[in-house]
C-alpha cells in the first residue's frame, strides 16, 4: 500500500513539474511569436526587386492595432517602395533627400523612401488576429546581407510599442527587435537581379507558353479524333466487304 501511494505521489509531482515547465516555455516563447517582422514573398535577391510583407500580430487582448510606421534604412536607401492598397487602411509614403545620390536604371536618384505609415480607418487589427502589409521594394543593395526596418506599432488605447532594437552579433535577441530582411545572392539572370520589367516579361512568356500548350492540346485532340474516325471507317469497310462475300455465297448456294 505504501509503495503504491509513493508511486502515485511521485507521478503527480512529475506531472506538475512537466506542466509548469510547459507553461514556462509558452511564456518565454510567446513574445517571440508576437514580434513585428518582415519577410519576402519568394527571394529578396541583391540588386533586384522583391515584394516584402510586414507582418503585424496583435499582442493585446483589449485593444486593436490602429497604426504602423515603418522606417526605411538610410545606410542602404531604396529608391522604389510601392505599398499595396489594403481595405480599411490609409497609406502615406514619405520621401527624404539623400546625402549622396544613388544610381537606378542609369538615372541619378536624389531622394528615397524614408517611411511608410499605415493608419486604420476602421477597427484595425483586432485581438487574436494579424495583418500583412505588402510593399514592392528595390533595387535592393548589392553590398549588404540584410536590411533593418525599424517599426512603431500603435494600439487603439494609445499604447505605443517601438520595434527598433538591433540585435548585435552573438548577442541575445532584444525585447523589441527591429524587423530584419535577409537578402539572398544576386539572381543568375544578371548582375542586377530581377527587375520589374523582367517580371512582366516572365509573365508574358508564361502566357505565351500556356497558349502554345493549349494549341498543342487542341492539335493532339484533333489528331486523336481523326485517328478514331479512320479506324471506324476501316472497320465499317471490312464489315461491308465481309457482308458482300457472305451474300454472294448465299446466292451461289441458292442458285445451285
Image (spheres, rainbow, N blue to C red):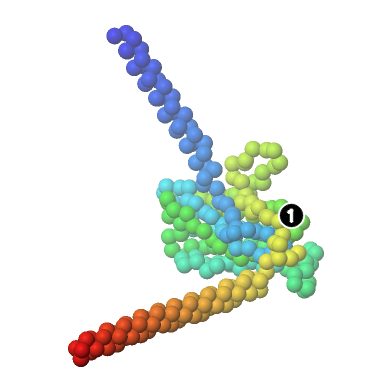
Q: Pointer 1: what residue?
A: 144
From the top left corner, tell me how far across and down residue 13 is, in percent.
40, 20
In this picture, residue 56 sits left or right of residue 248: right
In this picture, residue 109 sits left or right of residue 27: right
From the top left corner, tell me how far across and down residue 222 is, in percent.
45, 81
Q: Is residue 242 visible?
A: yes
In this orientation, which residue lies closer to the viewer: 220 or 208? 220
In this view, which residue lies farthest toward the left?
Answer: 254
In this orientation, which residue lies closer to the viewer: 198 or 108? 198
Residue 196 drawn above or below residue 34 = below
- Secondary-structure class at tag 1: loop
In this view, which residue lies farthest toward the front?
Answer: 256
Specify the quadrant of the image occupied by residue 12: top left
Total number of numbered discs in the rendering: 1
| Residue located 74% across and 54% down the image | 144
Q: In which quarter of the image is the N terminus?
A: top left
In this view, which residue lies farthest toward the bottom?
Answer: 255
Q: Can residue 247 be seen in this view?
A: no
| Residue located 60% across and 63% down the image | 51
For label 1, the crowd category at 10 Å Cα-Cα, with few meaning under 14, some 14 to 19 and many 20 or more, is: some
Residue 64 drawn above or below residue 168 = below
| Residue located 55% across and 67% down the image | 84
In this picture, residue 72 sits left or right of residue 3: right
In this picture, residue 148 sits left or right of residue 87: right
From the top left corner, tell me how far across and down residue 194 is, in percent.
68, 66
Q: In which quarter of the image is the C terminus?
A: bottom left
Amino acid at each position: 500500500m505504501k509503495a503504491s501511494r509513493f508511486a502515485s505521489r511521485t507521478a503527480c509531482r512529475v506531472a506538475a513539474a512537466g506542466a509548469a515547465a510547459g507553461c514556462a516555455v509558452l511564456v518565454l516563447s510567446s513574445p517571440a511569436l508576437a514580434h513585428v517582422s518582415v519577410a519576402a514573398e519568394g527571394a529578396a535577391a541583391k540588386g533586384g526587386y522583391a515584394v516584402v510583407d510586414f507582418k503585424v500580430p496583435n499582442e493585446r487582448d483589449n485593444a486593436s492595432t490602429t497604426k504602423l510606421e515603418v522606417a526605411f534604412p538610410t545606410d542602404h536607401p531604396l529608391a522604389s517602395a510601392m505599398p499595396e492598397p489594403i481595405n480599411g487602411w490609409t497609406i502615406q509614403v514619405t520621401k527624404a533627400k539623400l546625402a549622396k545620390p544613388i544610381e537606378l536604371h542609369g538615372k541619378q536618384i536624389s531622394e528615397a523612401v524614408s517611411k511608410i505609415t499605415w493608419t486604420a480607418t476602421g477597427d484595425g487589427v483586432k485581438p487574436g488576429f494579424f495583418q500583412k502589409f505588402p510593399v514592392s521594394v528595390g533595387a535592393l543593395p548589392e553590398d549588404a546581407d540584410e536590411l533593418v526596418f525599424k517599426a512603431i506599432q500603435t494600439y487603439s488605447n494609445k499604447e505605443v510599442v517601438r520595434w527598433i532594437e538591433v540585435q548585435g552579433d552573438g548577442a541575445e535577441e532584444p525585447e523589441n527587435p527591429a524587423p530584419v530582411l535577409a537578402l539572398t545572392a544576386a539572381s543568375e539572370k544578371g548582375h542586377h537581379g530581377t527587375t520589374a520589367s523582367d517580371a512582366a516579361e516572365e509573365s508574358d512568356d508564361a502566357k505565351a507558353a500556356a497558349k502554345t500548350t493549349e494549341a498543342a492540346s487542341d492539335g493532339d485532340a484533333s489528331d486523336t479524333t481523326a485517328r478514331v474516325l479512320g479506324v471506324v471507317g476501316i472497320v465499317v469497310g471490312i464489315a461491308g466487304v465481309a457482308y458482300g462475300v457472305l451474300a454472294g455465297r448465299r446466292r451461289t448456294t441458292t442458285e445451285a
